[in-house]
Image: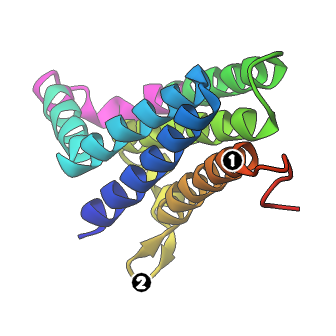
């Protein structure tokens, strides 16, 4: 049920980003829309669980599952460093649109990193990601918070472009 809810949330963000793309004629918003369509598909088919299952089976078949902690922490750190480098690159873009697009790009990047971490983590990172109250987990809050932030950025960018007087819908 949570996968369906997540896919619907991602599809909503994709529609808002697509609207911003059409109104602003922006390739950046188009890329964000395509990214969220891909995330919706990823969520609908349960790809994270499939990747986790495949990786666990491959590690067990090679007898390397017990030693996963030796490479899992460096892999998680590499994912976070790659995301940080991507974030710095996005933050330095000039002429790539307004702040809403850059912020939406950063939120999308963070969401992509979260998806990769969830797919590749087996225990140490899971302890943090799956901490929560009842069925709600930290990663659910991060996931939906980043998606909602991206949607708000798209709505703001598209709304600013559609006002006849040029004023933003958001003061």
Vertical comparison of 113 with 169: above or below: above
| Nearer-the-camera pick, 62 or 130 | 130
Report the predominant secondary structure element of the magenta stretch. helix
Residue 33: mark in rendering: none
Question: Percent x, y for residue 38?
Answer: 33, 35
- Give SS at disc 2: loop
Query: Earlier along the polypeptide chain: callout 2 or callout 1?
Result: 2
Reading the image, the residue beneath label 1 is 162
Observer-side mark, 2 or 1, equals 1
Side of 167 where 46 appears, left or right: left
Where residue 86 appears, as percent x and y from the top left, is 67, 21
**Residue 94: x, y in percent?**
83, 15
Magenta-highlighted residues: 59-74
Look at the numbered disc 1 and give the secondary structure of its residue: helix
- Magenta stretch: residue 69 in it? yes
Residue found 80% across the figure and 25% down from its top: 91
Q: Left of 7 or right of it: where is 79?
A: right
Residue bearing the label numbered 2: 134
The front one of 20 and 85 is 20
Is 87 in the magenta? no
Is residue 76 at all visible to an observer of this figure?
no
Q: Counting other residues with Cα less than 10 Å from the Cα at mark 1, is it few (<14), some (14-19), or many (20 or more)?
A: some
């Amino acid at each position: 049920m949570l996968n369906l809810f997540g896919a619907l949330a991602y599809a909503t963000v994709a529609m808002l980003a697509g609207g911003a793309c059409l109104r602003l004629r922006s390739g950046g918003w188009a890329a964000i829309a395509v990214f969220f369509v891909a995330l919706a598909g990823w969520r609908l088919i349960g790809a994270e669980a499939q990747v986790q299952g495949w990786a666990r089976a491959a590690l067990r078949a090679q007898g390397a599952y017990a030693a996963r902690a030796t490479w899992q922490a460096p892999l998680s750190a590499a994912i976070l460093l790659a995301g940080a480098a991507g974030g710095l690159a996005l933050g330095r873009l000039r002429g790539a649109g307004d702040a809403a697009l850059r912020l939406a790009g950063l939120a999308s990047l963070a969401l992509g990193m979260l998806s990769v971490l969830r797919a590749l983590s087996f225990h140490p990172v899971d302890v943090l990601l799956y901490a929560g109250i009842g069925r709600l987990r930290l990663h659910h809050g991060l996931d939906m918070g980043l998606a909602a932030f991206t949607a708000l950025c798209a709505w703001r960018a598209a709304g600013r472009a559609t006002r006849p007087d040029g004023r933003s819908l958001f003061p």
